[in-house]
Amino acid sequence: MPDLFEEIKNNAPLIMGIVNTTPDSFSDGGDYDDPDKALAHGAALLEQGAHILDIGGESTRPNAKKVPVEEEIQRVLPAIKGLKNKAGFISIDTRNAQTMEAAITAGANIINDVSALLHDPQSVHIAAQSNLPVCLMHMKGTPETMQNNPAYEDIIDDLKSYFEERMNFCLRNGVKEENIILDPGIGFGKTLQHNLLILKHLKSFQVFGRPILLGVSRKSFIQMIDGEKDPKQRLGGSLAAALHGAFDGGAQIIRVHDVLETRQALNVYQAILSA
């Protein structure tokens, strides 16, 4: 099995390409909910330069409703099975232990949980038993409630306290510290100002000594700044935030919809820095 953390050490920032097998994701819902379309999309993202494919079967956009676990599993397994021999790394984007277990059996080798293993009491045990990399994301509340006037005493300090608590929880339950990745959860229970402060102070989270995953692609904070309502027309804002996150903020994994354009932007920026 390839070692994600060696890949991060040698080639960061890595690009995580998004494969949503959902009918209702905020940006591409319904585009790839057919298994053949999901397989073709995942293969195309790999050709464009994705290091990781993040496959999800439940939308966690604001106000999204829960999906029955059996349905979520049926959505993601064909894509995982069809892409596991093409991708070095496949991440299962889920907050449900049963889906994690089924996805790992099918070939996924990273766990990406927007609830940081809070949603399902069994998920931490699946993460520990698998000994796979696990991404702990910060989200205030649930997708149904997270944008209902989110408030913090100090957004950076509050996220640090959250990560400290979740890491300690993981360690107590058998998840190895060296398997943990942290994601500040841009757009998940945050106002525009919260999102901008997280991006501005992203390096603050390096205090934990763990890789940072950053997801800014096509998110609504770009619309709040620029006015663009169509998520698919937010490429410029997505690239600006990704470049800042990778080179000023120290994020080692950038989760994106537009892999080719992100790869090109990262490569050019890196070349300028290295000249």
Image (cartoon, rainbow, N blue to C red):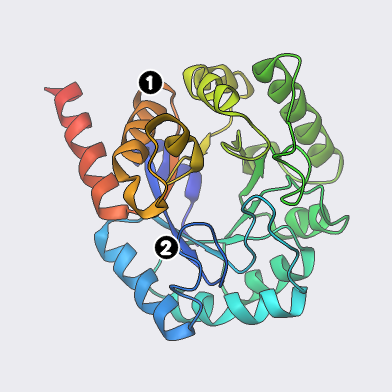
Which callout, 1 or 2, points to the residue nearer the camera? 1
Label placed on residue 1: none
Circle 2 packing at 10 Å, graded few (<14), some (14-19), many (20+), is some
Identify which residue is drawn at 39% across, 70% down.
Answer: 42
Reading the image, the residue beneath label 2 is: 88
Where is residue 163 drawn, in percent x and y? 72, 29
Where is residue 243 drawn, in percent x and y? 33, 31
> What's the distance in space between the residues labelled 1 and 2, CA to CA?
27 Å
Where is residue 64 drawn, in percent x and y? 68, 58
Residue 28 shown left or right of residue 112 in the figure: left
Reading the image, the residue beneath label 1 is: 248
Q: Is residue 28 visible?
A: yes
In contact (CB < 8 Å): disc 1 and disc 2: no
When the figure is inspected, residue 133 is found, relative to residue 70, above or below; the finding is: above
Q: Secondary structure at mark 2?
A: loop
> What amino acid type should be assigned to the residue bearing mark 2?
Gly
Where is residue 34 drawn, in percent x and y? 48, 83
Query: Residue furthest toward the left?
Result: 275
Q: Secondary structure at mark 1?
A: helix
> What amino acid type should be assigned to the residue bearing mark 1?
Asp
Residue 131 shown left or right of residue 46 in the figure: right
Q: Nearer the viewer, residue 144 or 12?
A: 144
